[in-house]
Image (spheres, grey):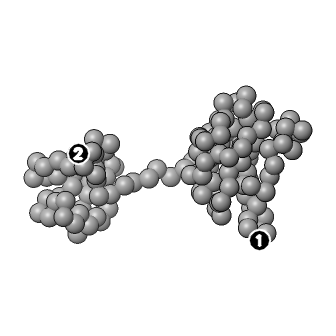
C-alpha cells in the first residue's frame, strides 16, 4: 500500500498501486496521467492513474422524491423542470407544459445522474435538454 497526496488540503488516501509503480509513491494525478516520486509518469493514454476520484454531486437547489413501488418511482426536481424515471410520460408533461427529462433502468437518484436521457418534453427541449445526454447534464439545465 502506498499513500497519495490527493489535494492541496493534504487529503491522504490509501492506494494499492499494483504493478504500475511497485517501488514508487504516487504524488500527483490528473487527466494527463500519474506522477510518481521516482520521476516516472504513466500517461493517461496508457491507463492513467490506478485511482479515480469522483466528485460528489451537489444536490443544492434540487429536491429528490422516491416512492416505493415494484421498482422505485424517482424524481429530481429543479427550479425549471424535473428528471424522472420511466414511470413518467414525457407526452403528459407536454400536455401540462412542464419541462421533464426521462431516464430508465434506475434504482437510485445517483443512478439517474449517470443514465442517458431517453425522452424529453417540449419545454425541456427549449432549455437545451436532448435525448442522449446524461441525467446529470439534464438536471443541471433545470437547476
Quadrant that contains the N terminus: bottom left
Horizontal and vertical percent for residue 52?
37, 55
Q: How many marks?
A: 2
In this rendered view, identify the residue nearer to me: 108 or 125.
125
Above-or-below relation of 108 to 36: below
- Badge 1: residue crowd in 10 Å (few <14, some 14–19, many ≥20): few
Rendering quarter of residue 66:
bottom right
> Is label 1 in a helix, a strand or a loop?
loop
Closer to the chain start, of discs 2 and 1, is 2
Rendering quarter of residue 44:
top left
Left or right position of 102 against 133: right
- Badge 2: residue crowd in 10 Å (few <14, some 14–19, many ≥20): some
Q: Is residue 64 visible?
A: no
Horizontal and vertical percent for residue 89?
81, 49
Q: At 14% across and 64% down in the image, what residue appears?
A: 22
Q: At 74% across and 55% down in the image, what residue appears?
A: 86
Contact, mark 2 vs mark 1 (Cβ under 8 Å): no
Q: Is residue 16 visible?
A: yes
Above-or-below relation of 18 to 139: below
Horizontal and vertical percent for residue 131?
65, 40
In this rendered view, identify the residue nearer to me: 5 or 57.
57
Q: At 73% across and 35% down in the image, what residue appears?
A: 124
According to the picture, the residue beneath numbered tag 1 turns out to be 70
Amino acid at each position: 500500500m502506498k499513500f497519495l497526496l490527493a489535494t492541496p488540503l493534504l487529503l491522504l488516501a490509501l492506494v494499492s498501486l499494483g504493478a504500475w509503480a511497485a517501488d514508487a509513491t504516487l504524488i500527483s494525478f490528473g487527466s494527463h496521467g500519474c506522477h510518481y516520486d521516482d520521476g516516472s509518469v504513466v500517461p493517461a493514454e496508457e491507463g492513467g492513474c490506478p485511482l479515480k476520484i469522483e466528485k460528489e454531486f451537489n444536490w443544492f437547489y434540487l429536491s429528490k422524491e422516491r416512492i416505493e413501488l415494484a421498482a422505485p418511482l424517482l424524481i429530481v426536481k429543479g427550479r425549471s423542470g424535473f428528471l424522472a424515471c420511466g414511470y413518467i410520460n414525457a407526452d403528459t408533461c407536454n400536455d401540462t407544459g412542464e419541462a421533464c427529462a426521462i431516464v430508465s433502468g434506475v434504482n437510485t437518484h445517483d443512478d439517474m445522474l449517470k443514465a442517458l436521457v431517453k425522452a424529453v418534453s417540449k419545454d425541456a427541449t427549449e432549455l437545451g435538454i436532448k435525448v442522449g445526454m446524461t441525467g446529470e447534464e439534464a438536471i443541471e439545465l433545470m437547476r
